[in-house]
Each structure stands twice: as structure tokens, then as C-alpha cells.
Amino acid sequence: MNTVIEVRDLTRRFGDFVAVDRVSFHVEKGEIFGYLGANGAGKSTTIRMLCGLLAPTEGVAMVAGHDIRDDARKVRAAIGYMSQKFSLYLDLPVRANLEFYAGAYEIESPRKRVQEILELLDLEVHRDQITGALPGGTRQRLGLGCALLHRPEIVFLDEPTAGVDPASRRDFWRLIRSLSREGTTVFVTTHYMDEAEYCQRIGLMVDGRLAALDTPRALKRDLVPGRMFRVSNVDERASRAVLSGMSGVVDVQPFGTRLHVRVRPGGPEAPDLGKQLSQAGLSGAEIEEIEPTLEDVFLAVVDPTKGSAAA
């Protein structure tokens, strides 16, 4: 394996506030590495340090073989970065934005590289359109294109699909997987747990600490043990109160208009849950066993009393 990001005890304080607290992990070449957490968990602060934009208070990090403290300029030359608020010039046409960033990166044969990006990201049809008039998904593809112009080893994507429609998000993730297959390392943060399923490994940040790190499958197995049931066609609030009081039920969480109910190994079965609801006057519930989701994992990590220790 070829490690391209190595982080050891990385810490960042702002006065008395610890934004990132002794975080350690590594990322391999070509990996899609997901970095998840609530707002304020320390995700963006970590990325800013890894991009050489913010000095750590303590700890060590190597990015593309360069120390983020001593070689910040070399780090920035080896990476691409984009976010939900990527700095595109909204009054310029698509091609002009790409040409501007190609000049900033001092790319050889800039016209050729701009044309490659237009074709790679399916932007050719938009080349002469004003950037500010583009749909959100198309604008994000352009942002990614600007980050890829100089062929970086690593791309940092900080909430790249926030506010983008589901179809555009799927298209964007097809591009991310294609980049990974070609050897580009992708370090991505997202609030969308369905997107996180595409990541090969996931780190979960809680209050500045790396609370969990593993593959999506392993996180669901280890942090959400027991069995999971989905309960629908019920009064959510009343059903949650009834099921939460059942022996063997570890957690009950609302998911849209449905409930996810986790029970201990050997705990209640679907008919038992239905019977309990019926006895409380809540008949007609539809109950099926399901696999846990990464959102279930996140909830278990945020509230450890409902995670593996409680099973």
C-alpha cells in the first residue's frame, strides 16, 4: 500500500477551544476516504491543516510526502481543493474560469488541459455559458474541474454536493469513483449518509475527536450490533414512546415518517413489536427487518449509551 496522507496526534486549538483533538489516521493512494461529523465537529479545520492553510497547534501530518508545517507550499502544489462555496467567478463563462485557474497553476499547454477537463466532466456543452447561470450540479462539476486542472495526487472535497439535487449528486459521485479508479486519492466530507456508503473507509468526528474509523460495513457491524427493524404506517411519536419502553429495545429513532428500532441480540422479533403497538392502540404497523444505515452508526457514535457498549 502507498500511504499519501499520514496524520499523528493532529491538534488545533483556538484559544481555550480545541477544534481538533489528537486525531490520527492514514489514507492510501486512490482511496475514497470519508470524513463525517456534525457541524463544528472539526472536519473543515482538519482539512485546512492538511491543505497547508492552517498550522496545527500540535501533532504531525504528511501529505503527498510533504510535512504540512515545513512544506506547506509543496503540499498545496500536490493537492486540489473544492467546497460548496468554491471560488468560481460567477460572471465569467465556464471556459474562462478554467483558463483563469490554469494560468494560476502555471499549467503547461493550458488550452489542451482545459479542453480535457471540459470533456472529462461533460462540460463542453456549457463552455460558453455564464457560470452564475449554471444549475448547482453543473457548477459543482466546474468547481471540481478547476481543482483537477493541475493533476493533483489528492483532492479534498469539503461538502461538495451540499444543496445539489439527488440526480446531480449521483453524477458527481460517479466522477469521484472514476478519479479513484485512476489513482487519485479523494478525501471527502459530506452530510449525506447515502453518499458516505461510496467511501472505502470512513472517519467519524465528534467534538473534535476521531470517534470511529473503518469501512462502512465494519462500522455498521461493530457499532450497531443487534437487529434493526423499520416500523412504518404508525403515529411516530406515540409509537416511539411505546417501543422505547420495551425490554430488549436498545434505541428507537425517527427516519422521516418511519422509525428505526434496534433490539439486542435475542431481543424482540417483529411480531413482538407489532403486538406491543396493538396493545397500546396503535394497530396497522408495518414492520420489517433491515440492515443498519450509516445514519444509525452516526447516531450510535454521537450517543455511546446506544452503541456497542449497550448491546
Image (cartoon, rainbow, N blue to C red):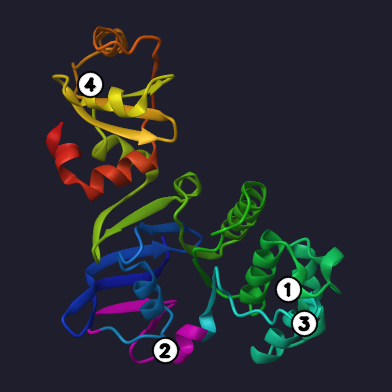
Secondary structure under tag 1 reads: helix
- Where residue 117 sits: x, y (%)? 74, 70
Q: Which residue is mark 1?
A: 132
* Left or right of 225, for residue 234: right
Question: Of label 2 and label 3, which has the lower sequence position?
Answer: 2
As drawn, the label of residue 72 is 2
- Which residue appears at 39% of the width and 63% of the height? 27
Q: Residues within 10 Å of mark 4 (few under 14, many from 20)?
A: some
Residues at marks 4 and 2 touching, judged by CB atoms closer than 8 Å:
no
- Which residue appears at 24% of the width and 47% of the height? 301
Disc 4 versus disc 2: distance between alpha carbons?
A: 56 Å
Q: Residues within 10 Å of mark 2 (few under 14, many from 20)?
A: many
- Where residue 70 sits: x, y (%)? 35, 92
Q: Amino acid at mark 2?
A: Ala
Quick one: 204 or 277, which is closer to the camera?
Answer: 277
As drawn, the label of residue 92 is 3
